[in-house]
Image (cartoon, grey):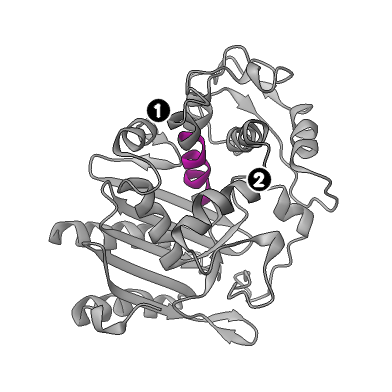
Amino acid sequence: MISQTYLDRAQQQHLRQVLQPLSFGGTAIIVCNDRLIASYSHGQATPHQRNQFNTAFEIDSLQKAVTATLVMQLVAQHQLSLQDQLYQFYPQVPGSRLITLRQLLDMTSGLVAQLPTNLTQWTSDQAFLNQQIQQLRFSSNLYGKWNYAPINYMLLSGILEQLTGKSYQQLLTQQIIRPLQLQQTNFAYALPPNSTAAAGYTAQEQVIQTPIAQQHSELGTGQLFMSAWDLYRTEAAMLNGTLLNNASAAQLFVSGSASNYGGGFYQNDDLLRANGSGYGFQTFTRISRNGANAVIILSNHQPAADVDLRQIADQLAQQLFLQV
């Protein structure tokens, strides 16, 4: 637990004033110069537990930057090159001789997939990928252009498993969870009995039940639960030399298209942005390129139609970055 003595009273009051009128359900934090300066938690985590600072939320698509970091670690170890062709790992994928790993990271591969939305049976990551590959389509019109498709990061996760001989879960635990000593980070399909994980709620305040197989199917793209502080520490470690050296981070986190997307983040000059949504959760990160300053909003209650948490995250980040 972070000591409350570090909190900035004015920032704490401002964060509360912004979120409280919105019937916000979740946890939000603001970090300035590597120090937590504001934190706000509200609403139910589960029917029997309130959201708290250490509550874990499904981070949805924010996981893609974690997957990209695992890929870049292998590049730094000379086990991979971002110019390697997908064909080397999945020759059965249409267009795989044209597609590089860099294009998968940037989502400019031209691959189009219809992923399952309510999977009920699961055997293994590779069996799932092989099944999805059978339905993949390569679009020459989309090749080289940004098209948001989770299959890009699922394939990267499969490549990680092929090269390391470990499951994605084992690799992430070995390379990120243990080195950073993350305490509230777990896979959605393997939550321990003492987990602080929140449930996802609909806008009508109904708990969303997600089958275990469906949680598995979000391979490398949306199957992690993390507290806001664990998420900040992980993203900061990607950027400050802890998980990646500065050269690797600079190579990974660059814009790959007009969308500015690359390596799991949308790239701006001084700011990296990421957004996620699914299973009742909404997640937003705004973090400086050195990892020292950040706004993170994790919600487990679908907000009212007129509430835009993405815009709130942008506004809070703009105010923070004017101060540093």
Q: Does residue 275 appear to the left or right of 171 in the view shown?
A: left
Q: Residue furthest bottom?
A: 48
Is residue 70 magenta-colored? yes
Report the magenta stretch's main SS: helix
User: Mark 2 against mark 1, which lies toward the viewer?
Assistant: 2
Question: What is the quadrant of residue 285 in the picture?
Answer: bottom left
Is residue 212 magenta-colored? no
Instruction: Residue type at mark 1: give it.
Output: Gly
**C-alpha span from label 2 to label 1:** 22 Å
Which of the two residues, 242 or 264, is positioned nearer the viewer here? 242
For the residue carrying disc 2, how many other residues have a C-alpha within 10 Å: few (<14), some (14-19), or many (20+)? many
Above or below 307: residue 11: below
Which of the two residues, 8 or 302, is positioned nearer the viewer here? 8
Looking at the rendered structure, the secondary structure element under dot 2 is: loop
Which of the two residues, 144 or 72, is positioned nearer the viewer here? 72
Q: Which residues are magenta?
A: 63-72
> N-terminal of the two: label 2 or label 1?
2
Q: Position of residue 248 (x, y in %)?
A: 36, 34
Above or below 277: residue 165: above
Image quarter hosting the C terminus: bottom left
Residue 307 in view (yes/no):
no
Looking at the rendered structure, the secondary structure element under dot 1 is: loop
Q: Position of residue 47 (x, y in %)?
A: 65, 84
Q: Which mark is residue 136?
A: none
Mark 2 touches mark 1? (CB < 8 Å): no
Residue 224 in view (yes/no):
yes
Q: Does residue 277 appear to the left or right of 295 in the view shown?
A: right
Q: Which mark is residue 256?
A: 1
Which residue is under mark 2? 219
Q: Position of residue 104 (x, y in %)?
A: 53, 28
Q: Residue at x 45, y 75 (%)?
A: 24
